Image (cartoon, helix red, strand yellow):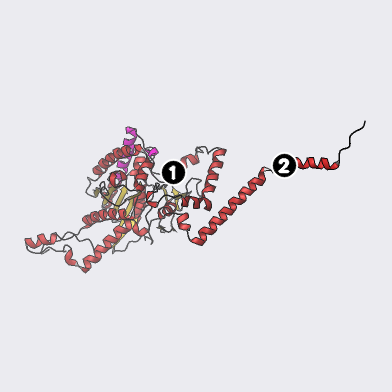
Amino acid sequence: MYKPYKPRSQSRSRRWKQKPRRRPWYVYAAALAGILVGLELMARLVISSTGLSQAVLPQSDLDKRAAAYQMEFLSPSGQPYALPDSGQLQAVRSPLLGYQLLPQQQSDYWQINAQGFRADQAVSSQKASSELRIFLLGGSMAFGQLSSSNQATLASQIETRLNAQVAAQQAQPGQFQPATLPYTADEVQKVLQRQARIPERQYRVVNAAVPGYASGNNLASLVQLSTYSPDLLLLLDGQTDLLLPSRYSAADVPGLDALLLNQAKPGPKLGEQIGQRLTGWLNQLYALRVLQYLRRQPPETMAQPAVKLATVELASADLNADPAELEARVQRYQAHLAQMVRWSAAARKPILVGLEPTLLDRNQAQLSQQEQAILADLGSSYQQQIKAGYSKLTAAAQQAASSPNVRLLDLKDLYAQTAEPAFQSATSLTDAASAQLAERFYQAIVAQLAVEPKPFGQ
């Protein structure tokens, strides 16, 4: 059959008029990735060349401290437990103490000595005759959680004040009460108005506190501290006992039960895991940090987040509204304190007891943004239950303080009217607030150790 002839040029022209094929999706993905990489490299180059790293990638000193003070828990063999939020401050699980700080470790903010105490120097088991030893027991507040250095902690500041008084007594004896009273009554009244004199010894205040410790841990620590021949004991605790369930006699490695029994909460789904990793990756991009920096609020209007120390920090979920459970927790505290009082009576060593001040005792109108964020993070139930628990703890401590070897310090209103911020977390004080607390303990120690002047002629 005859077919009409079609010129070849006509067939080619039709092919040219056809729509071009679409490029594969991975071509566009590669182009987008190249653009992102280019922006990231450019952002890093700009930040490094302009010196804006601290402004664009800010990390406050408080953030650095929180990372340094976050704890990492190890097994007795030295293997780390697979717990979340592990940090730099290492603690080893102990059958007697629950856990104890690993000796010989340090960071930019703290140093742990060879005995596991927070101190720059070792503490010998042999005490010199010229030395008067005071040991501080407690949890996070006594340890000095989030403090700027060992020297800023409660124990160190008390030690400094006591040794400074000894130096003042030697340099200016007329400002202190004399060893022997004068002959006339009017002169006696004058010299008794002077500051009390303390024994002229070398004072050593050892920080044996450990973050997260409750009264049961402090009681167990006292057994070990006896080998160091303490002359006086300082105790600062309270809050952890209100949060620790009554079925536990002392605080242990947090989260360990769930880990050992394989009862940890199920992890996030695959989609959530991908989303979390993607979010974390994006937050590390310098280009995104530059964009956030350009859109950032002025520093004075930026919200201050609450500092979280997850392994030892207080949480409102640990509170219990059941009156019977609260009573059991208070009775546990009272029983442990009673055992410490019996030890002090047998050893003839006095104890100064203080319940940790709380953020709730501060004037609410004077709270800083950081302190307001701490309260908001703790939750609404925290305020009522902590207040109820503290009234019961105070009654228990007052009963124990009826012993002549024990004195209870009233610390409730210590920061009530303080204009400057006092708390960095629910159980962590600022350096200035630690100095206030040290002054209160120092005055109590002077009253306890005061050398009574002898009557004239003796």
Q: Left or right: where does residue 315 sit relative to residue 340? A: right
Of the image marks 2 and 1, the number of the one nearer the N terminus: 2
Say whether residue 398 is visible.
yes
Q: Left or right: where does residue 174 sit relative to residue 429? A: left
Residue stretch rendered in magenta on the structure = 311-339
Where does label 2 land, which residue? 21
Q: Residues within 10 Å of mark 1 (few under 14, many from 20)?
A: some
Under tag 1, what secondary structure? Answer: loop
Between residue 261 and residue 348, name the one nearer to us. Answer: 261
The disc placed on residue 366 is none
Q: Left or right: where does residue 43 sit relative to residue 112? A: right
Q: Could you tell me what secondary structure mostly forms the magenta stretch?
A: helix
Where does label 1 land, which residue? 254
Q: Establish if 322 lies above or below 17.
A: above
For the N terminus, give its image quadrant. top right
Between residue 276 and residue 334, name the one nearer to us. Answer: 276
Q: Label 1 is placed on what type of residue?
A: Pro
Q: Residue furthest right?
A: 1
